[in-house]
Image (cartoon, rainbow, N blue to C red):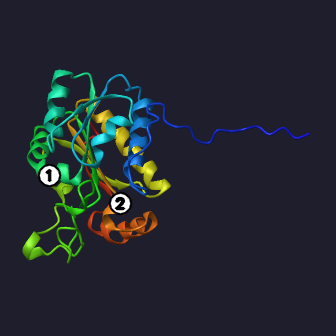
Amino acid sequence: MTTVTETTVYQKPRLMNDNPMHYCPGCSHGVVHKLLAEVIDEMGLAEKTIGIAPVGCAVFAYNYLDIDWIEAAHGRAPAVATAAKRLNPDKMVFTYQGDGDLAAIGTAETIHACNRGENIVIVFINNAIYGMTGGQMAPTTLLDMKTSTCPYGRNIALNGYPLKITELLAHLKGTCLVARETVHTAAAIKRSKKLLQRAFANAMAGKGTSIIEIVSTCASGWKMTPDEANQWMVANMLPFYPTGIIKDETTNS
């Protein structure tokens, strides 16, 4: 008689709550949440981490990760993170922000926190659209990309150029690690996890601000299936927002 031994090939991260996900099918947020839960737990930071949740699709991140959270006003997450880290220098403080929150209403807070070199991590989810409020044009919306507020496509003369805020932040003296990845394949997920681990280590070591941008999909806002959204992201988003490390001043420090 053959004995079958069951082997667990995957287990839910310990820090992820059992609340049902509210994100749309194909959304990248759930994957990034999982990575954050794994990184925080594996680095032994569960009791030391403070997440800053702003406004947008990411506003309910506190429902899924069993760590301490602070709710920030729209766009103000880096300012709140600054206060949390300065008052609790032994804590690991990170913000979790979408492109509308970080690159539109929160541009000033983002730039100045990075320029000061606050010892925090900024996790930036870029899906080139306002996903929560109806699919409006975001600062990161691509040229000719259609949204509910530019139904004929983003026009330079009317709407200006897409904002590559991650590259802009890389020029600031206070940033130590600036990188961009995706989570649409297993290999990309592994790379994103390594970047998050490095960013968290930087913050705890007092090396300055780390920004990890995740180029993401919004199947609902883009009016596509999850598979179509992944393909569209690869064909359109990644040529304009290429993945890789943009700035790294931590390897020799």
Looking at this view, is 143 or 63 the one in front? 63
The residue where tag 2 is placed is 217
Looking at this view, is 194 or 93 the one in front? 93
Kindly state the secondary structure of the residue where label 1 is placed: loop
Q: Earlier in the sequence, mark 1 or mark 2?
A: 1
Gap in angstroms between the C-alphas marked 1 and 2: 27 Å
Residue 155 position, x and y percent, is: 14, 75
Q: Nearer the viewer, mark 1 or mark 2?
A: 2
Looking at this view, is 174 or 27 the one in front? 27
Name the residue at 20% across, 63% down: 136
Q: Does 63 sit above or below residue 190?
A: above
Q: Does 140 sit above or below residue 107?
A: below
The residue where tag 1 is placed is 171
Name the residue at 39% across, 42% down: 33
Amino acid carrying mark 2 in the image: Thr
Q: Is residue 184 visible?
A: yes
